[in-house]
Image: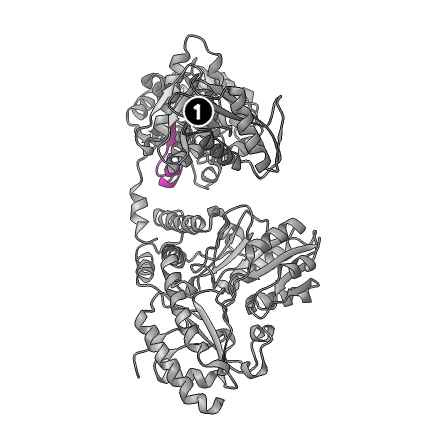
Amino acid sequence: MVNTIYLDNSATTKPLKEVMQAFMTVNEQYYANPASIHAMGVESNDLLMRAREQVADILQTEAKNVLFTSGGTESNNAAIFGIAHSNTHIGKHILTTEIEHPSVLETVKQLEKEGYDVEYLHVNQDGVISLDDLRTKIRKDTILVSIMHVNNEMGAVQPIYEAAKIIHEMSRAFLHVDAVQSFGKLAVSFKGEEGPDCISISGHKIHGFKGSGVLAFRKKLKWQPYALGGGQEFGLRSGTVAVPQAVALAKAARLAVETMKDRATKYRQWQNEIRAQLEGYGEAVHILSTPQGAAHILSFSVRDLKGEVIINAMQKRGIIVSTSSACSSKQTKTSHVVEALHLDEHYKKGVIRISFGAHNTVEDIEQLKQVLAEVIMELKGEIM
Amino acid sequence: MIWKEILIRYGELSTKGRNKMDFIRRLRENIRHAFADLGHLHIRTERDRMFIAIESEEQMQTLITGLPKIFGIQSFSPVAACEKDMESMKQLAITIMETFKDEQHTFKVEVKRTDKSFPLESHAIQREIGGYVLPQFQNLSVKVKQPDIELRVEVRHDATYMMAQVIQGAGGMPVGSNGKSLLMLSGGIDSPVAGYLMMKRGVRLEAIHFFSPPYTSQNSLEKVKVLANELTKFGASIRLHVIPFTEIQVLIKEKVPSNVSMTTTRRMMLKVADQVREEIGALAIVTGESLGQVASQTLESLTAINAVTNTPILRPLISTDKLEIIDIAEKIGTYETSIQPFEDCCTIFTPASPKTKPKLEKVEHYESFSDFDELIERAVKNREVYIFPKKEEQQQDKFADLL
């Protein structure tokens, strides 16, 4: 087996050494339950408070508006159910996009069964919603709009700040932003007058740990708790708080934001190089990611070729990439995101996603370019 | 950077006569103290206003966020400066008015020409600047009498100064201008609020807390330290006297019938506090008592408790409702700390049914069988004193490389 190069960072990332170090130290020294009243408990509660404040500072909100969760899926579920269930006095109308992550789509489908009225915003070929479409669909009784910041399958960036302005002008709805793919790559926070009301973040997408996430609010919302028990996390989400995970996430978030500019420049450079190479194959390759999209994701598809074939061929040469979305890549049907883009049938079979992370180097990218060339040449016989 | 200084207008002290200079000096010291992190500030004082020289944007931001907490300031304004030529002055006027572009406002330009050698007269300057600014902002309309915004331009010898924004201060009087009192700080919601209100009237505080280990935990003491530290944000350092109170409480529990034990406990606390007050040279004792809130705060109880001393006891919350107190606590940032559920000396040994109308003679009679005075002496002598604001805690650094 050749030395492996991991380029599937949108599926998950390898935790940074510093983050693992912090996680270990917290488990060794501050393992007491933060709800205990003895000195050790008080100490781990202080540490938890510091972690919460740090995340709050990064997102420009107050510590009391930051909830530690088990990850992006839980954050999305909690936000959508929470806002929907506590605002029925205003209405039951919900807007989201057709290319959201399943943790949003399945949740609104469930709400539909409960009698909510859900509508979907369409995207254009670049995977971006239209603000006019939003203006048309938003109503006085809209209570929730959920829009992902960066799409996980092809990197399209949604105009969430412009959307926020429209939403707040035309309705009393809350804007929930799934920032799982964008946090640490693009600026996203509660800064300024107009923006999201609620943001989901996941630890394992920013070189932190799986099983850790954040749901943060612009200001305190009155909600029904969704996990009952000891009343932790301001009573909303009971269960002994995982201090090590919270600390690790706070650290990963800080490092992600601190290195954001440099990484963005690096990723964009790599993305442009690979894009130029792929464009050289003409009709044989279709690139889904646009230059306006996120810098860390590049999705493309090879004409009439199954994604799996390409993945296997690249894997043999030591490069790990994925088909459009890891969560659904085991499924045989075309992903809902690819469907929404209305691709030509020839390009629907296999979308390949390359996604960069903090551990990637220039050498990795050189190797990738070489392997891409080899693989496409080798399989080109079938294409033509 | 366009900013030159911050102009501060005094609060109530504008009305004071001969003591005015003391007030101003006090305010200046409090400002220096509150912004010690910024290094040495250049502060110029005049009879009815004060100027802080600005050296950087960050410094400006820190001052703008911090000044509204300091008592004795009615309002303040960031002042900008530029070259003495009409072009720069017009540009600066635009920059300053940018601040107000989000809402409709009426405005006027007010010009003062200290440097009479400046070629244009005040009226001409006013017309030039007004005429230049107005068309560039859709949201402004001119109003000469009582406009929302007054853009003040002053052509001095060294430069042209300009300001428009007026930020409200906390009012009140500079802490320390009205002597010193001792605050009985329990760790509950009320006492920090009482302390804050006294500080607002210019009273310098020291605080006293009764600590009964092992019945009360280190946590409850830490909580009180945090509260004392919170109060220092309003412009003065605070000393906290922690009284070892276990002996006295245990003796009361053993010797005094349970339904009057609460009254006696309060009486002993007040005796201790009064001795500490005398030692530190404070004039009065401040409590967070609010009439009728609990058994010890009925008029009868207050009378029985108060009987141990002639020292003035100031109760700024006496007529305030609990919800109003909570509002203030939330506003000043002590509420979250106060509601942490740790036992303190007031909540342990609480009798099931304390008397709401204790009779003084009876209470005195029960107390007469024990010698409390010796224990009080000892408690006062063995107190621990902490000074706030605390320097950055060790703790901060302990967690630093984890986060």
Provide the residue designation for mark 1. B7
Q: Please give the range of residues in magenta.
A: B208-224
User: Does any portion of residue B195 appear in the rendered image?
Assistant: yes
Q: Residue at x 53, y 49 (%)?
A: A218
* Circle 1 residues within 10 Å: few <14, some 14–19, many ≥20: many
Q: Residue at x 43, y 82 (%)?
A: A311
The relative height of residue A59 versus residue A282 in the rendered view (above or below) is above
B313 left or right of B30 in image: right
Instruction: Give the amino acid at mark 1.
Output: Leu
Instruction: Work out whether residue A360 or residue A44 is closer to the camera in this orientation and state it.
Output: A360
Q: Is residue A141 magenta?
A: no
Callout 1: chain: B
Percent of width and height locating residue A209:
40, 64
Instruction: Work out whether residue A156 or residue B128 is closer to the camera in this orientation and state it.
Output: B128
Percent of width and height locating residue A170:
67, 51
Percent of width and height locating residue A132:
65, 59
Q: Is residue B212 magenta?
A: yes
